[in-house]
Image (cartoon, rainbow, N blue to C red):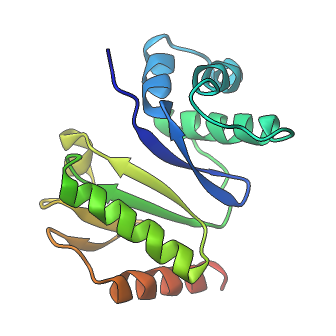
Amino acid sequence: MDTPTQRMLKIGKATIGLIGLDIALNKALAEKISVKNASNYLYDAIRGENYIPAGMKEEYKKALEREYKKLLGQEVEDDGDLIIRIFGTGCISCNGLQDAVIDAMMQADIAADIDMIHEPDEIGRHGITATPALMINGKVKIAGIHPTPVQLKQWLLEAAEKQHD
């Protein structure tokens, strides 16, 4: 049986770690669930493993549908926040980069969508040749080594400033 992992997802203005979302997304894709039905399917799949505050059900469903559309390669409405992609095989070093990014986001008080990309084919499609690698809004910032916390925070602040121009 697959072990559920945590995946970060932006829900409203908060970035939330959801357990089992990757598995639910892959099952929805394998079962060819329509976009129209995806939010209910995904919500039902993850709600048992995750705390969902009262009154946030629709926000969660909206975010889950958005994530499913991205997985299908469909266009999603830009919400004006940063998009961070962390590429790696799931090793300690790659997971450490995710933790460092989240710490820098908290220090800078910046919201962002964070995607962890583990598939070698997907990593290659983005032109990444060394992992861990960090991409912010489509630009590779570093590959093969960890940035310093100061570098991370600076990149996030610069990208956030460009978003609001």
Instruction: State the image quarter where residue 53 is shown.
Output: top right
Eyeballing the image, is 58 above or below 76? above
Q: Is residue 55 left or right of residue 2?
A: right
Q: Which residue is at 56% across, 33% downward? A: 68
Find residue 13 and report its horizontal and vertical position in percent: 71, 60
Asked whether residue 73 is in view, the answer is: no
Tell me if 112 is positioned left or right of 134 in this view. right
Residue at image location 43% in from the left, 88% down from the top = 154
Residue 15 higher or lower than 37, as above or below: below
Q: Residue at x 59, y 74 (%)?
A: 110
5 to 26, vertically: above or below: below
Q: Nearer the viewer, residue 22 or 36?
A: 22
Count the marks. 0
Residue 32 in picture, x, y percent from top left:
51, 13
Q: Is residue 79 above or below residue 49?
A: below
Q: Is residue 153 left or right of residue 88?
A: right
Query: Which part of the image, by quadrant, shows the C terminus?
Result: bottom right
Q: Position of residue 159 (x, y in %)?
A: 50, 80
Outermost residue to the top: 31
Q: Nearer the viewer, residue 136 or 45?
A: 45
Q: Is residue 114 visible?
A: yes
The quarter of the displayed image where residue 12 is located: bottom right
Residue at figure coordinates x 32%, y 14% from the top left: 1
Viewer-closest of 66 and 92? 92
Residue positioned most to the right: 55
**Along the line of sight, the residue nearer the viewer: 6 or 130:** 6
Residue 33 position in % (x across, y down): 57, 15
